[in-house]
Amino acid sequence: MKLNVSDALHNPGQEYAFHGEQAIAPVDIGGETVTFDTAVLQGAFFTDDDGGVTVDGKLTTVAHAQCANCLEPASTDIEAPFHETFVRGGDPNDDEIFSYEGYQVEFDKLAMSYAVMSLPIRFLCKEDCAGLGETIAVDSDYNSCQKELPGQHPFAALQQLLTKDEEV
Ligand SMILES: [Zn+2]
């Protein structure tokens, strides 16, 4: 998303509304890939006498990764309020500031930073996901399955093996 600020630069202090979409590239966090839906950014901006562009708004997107417990796909809604000032002609390689050149403010870096900052510590497919190990113990479907098909119980096969051994 690009914001044309040429009008605003002629009217410092005047507020302008903005609304747009910004794609966010996948990020690798601790060996895990997190992907994002296209983010929606909306809010207002104004310029100051030095050409700084202050943006005030909210980013919304959905982040996708693997459930920390069971490795199934998991996603989480992200809503991140932001307030930043873009420095005109600032160093684009300086991670401490947001900057822009000419008359266009780009939101790729801002969207990426705020989306990543708002990620949960752990993704879960559902709030009470028990994970791989515990699912077997608490899953009611499995238990009912066991009653209807006793032969399918994993220990049944083992019991048969043991019985055979005894017979030999
Ligand atoms: Zn899970």
Image (cartoon, grey):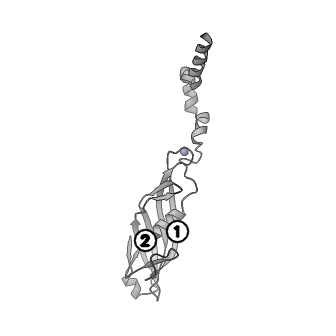
Q: Residue at x 44, y 86 (%)?
A: 51
Q: Quadrant of residue 36?
A: bottom left
80 over 35 or under it: above or below: below
Image quadrant occupied by the N terminus:
bottom left
Label 2 amino acid? Phe
Q: Quadrant of the C terminus?
A: top right
Q: Is residue 1 left or right of residue 34?
A: left
User: Does residue 118 lie above or below 128 as drawn?
Assistant: below
Provide the secondary structure element on which disc 2 rests: loop
Would you call the spot at circle 2 few (<14 residues within 10 Å), some (14-19), or many (20 or more)? Answer: many
Q: Residue at x 56, y 25 (%)?
A: 154
In the picture of the structure, the residue carrying the numbered disc 1 is 81
Residue 128 lies, with reference to residue 16, above or below; the image says above
x%, y% of residue 26? 44, 59
- For badge 1, the amino acid type reads Pro
- Alpha carbons under labels 2 and 1: distance apart: 14 Å
Identify the residue under disc 2.
107
Q: Residue at x 42, y 61 (%)?
A: 25
